[in-house]
């Protein structure tokens, strides 16, 4: 099962995960990070940026974003190319050429998934994959029903996801209908998974992902198949976990030889 860590605040979550990433980069300066977009990973990026200002060197770190909208120009401020450049590559001092985002341009979209998979394999795979979770249990843009074996491909977004993401656009009709996303199979190949979730709105999806049956109807339940998955949640997002006391206890009793996340 995934290790569940309940934290007091988003910034505490950010600090915890940033520390693990710093340890990873100390061991492996050219580590490969799997990058998520959305509000959820922002505390991690902020905490990492602080560490960079304090001297941490991430210039050799490589990155692969989870997903991108199809047909949204990369110059659009809400394209994930633009979001990753603004929130990650710039503030963390990564080398832009080493940060990859799926190619959502309609021309050549049929082969874009395969090209992205090849690039991940050529980089030696993802060391640590950051994940958020959609209110419908999606990770990346793997909507309910996505195969656990799926690789990077085009997915049609659900109405729910488009409504959730409408806040980044003028209105829901401006949210693209299609995305290109790493598949659940791609995500499961990463060597470590760290799923973050904050707020009451994520509680049901988190409980279903961590404790519910393994089902394509809750794509995030795929994390149960991963041997090294950590779920970092605030109290609100933890609210529907049946085994919450056990997770708290396990964390409090964590053996000294068992580091947090890494
Ligand atoms: C989008 C992204 C996901 C993200 C989800 C949740 O659909 N493709 O990667 O996890 O939104 O977003 P937020 O973190 O803003 O709640």
Image (cartoon, rainbow, N blue to C red):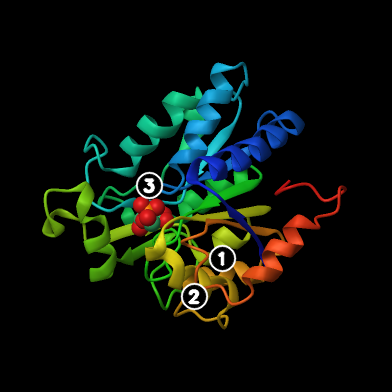
Q: Quadrant of residue 222?
A: bottom right
Element type at marker 1? helix
Would you say the beta carbon of the disc 2 residue lies within 8 angstroms of ligand 1? no
Image height check: is 115 above or below 14?
below
| x and y percentages locating residue 28 in the rendered image | 73, 33
- Please name the residue shown 37% across and 71% down the image: 136
Apparent side of residue 259 relative to residue 43 in the rendered image (left or right) = right
Q: Marks 3/1: CA distance? A: 24 Å
Which residue occupies the foreground of this view, 260 or 22? 260
Check residue 147 in the rendering and tell me which mark sits there, or answer none. Answer: 2
Q: Earlier in the sequence, mark 3 or mark 1?
A: 3
| x and y percentages locating residue 206 in the rendered image | 50, 68
- Circles 2 and 1 in contact, beta carbons < 8 Å: yes
Image height check: is 240 above or below 172?
below
- Please name the residue shown 37% across and 67% down the image: 135
| x and y percentages locating residue 151 in the rendered image | 50, 63
Image height check: is 175 above or below 211?
above
| x and y percentages locating residue 233 in the rendered image | 54, 56
Q: Marks 2/1: CA distance? A: 8 Å
- Please name the residue shown 12% across and 59% down the image: 173
Mark 1, residue position = 185
Q: Nearer the viewer, mark 2 or mark 3?
A: 3
- Please name the residue shown 52% across and 39% down the image: 44
Q: Is residue 148 visible?
A: no
Mark 3, residue position = 39
Q: Earlier in the sequence, mark 2 or mark 3?
A: 3
């Amino acid at each position: 099962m995934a290790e569940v860590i309940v934290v007091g605040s988003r910034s505490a979550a950010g600090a915890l995960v940033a520390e693990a990433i710093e340890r990873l980069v100390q061991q492996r300066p050219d580590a490969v990070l799997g990058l998520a977009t959305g509000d959820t990973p922002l505390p991690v990026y902020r905490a990492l940026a602080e560490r960079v200002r304090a001297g941490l060197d991430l210039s050799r770190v490589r990155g692969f974003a989870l997903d991108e909208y199809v047909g949204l120009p990369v110059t659009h401020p809400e394209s994930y190319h633009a979001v990753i450049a603004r929130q990650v590559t710039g503030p963390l001092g990564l080398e832009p050429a080493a940060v990859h985002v799926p190619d959502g341009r309609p021309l050549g979209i049929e082969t874009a998934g395969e090209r992205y998979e090849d690039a991940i394999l050529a980089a030696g795979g993802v060391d640590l994959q950051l994940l958020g979770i959609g209110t419908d249990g999606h990770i990346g843009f793997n909507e309910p029903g996505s195969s656990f074996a799926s690789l990077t491909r085009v997915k049609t977004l659900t109405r729910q996801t488009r409504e959730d993401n409408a806040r980044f656009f003028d209105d829901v009709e401006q949210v693209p209908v299609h995305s290109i996303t790493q598949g659940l199979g791609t995500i499961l190949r990463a060597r470590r998974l760290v799923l973050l979730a904050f707020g009451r709105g994520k509680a049901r999806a988190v409980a279903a992902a961590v404790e519910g049956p393994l089902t394509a109807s809750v794509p995030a339940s795929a994390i149960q198949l991963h041997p090294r998955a950590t779920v970092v949640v605030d109290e609100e997002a933890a609210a529907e976990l049946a085994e919450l006391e056990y997770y708290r206890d396990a964390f409090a009793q964590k053996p000294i030889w068992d580091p947090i996340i890494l």
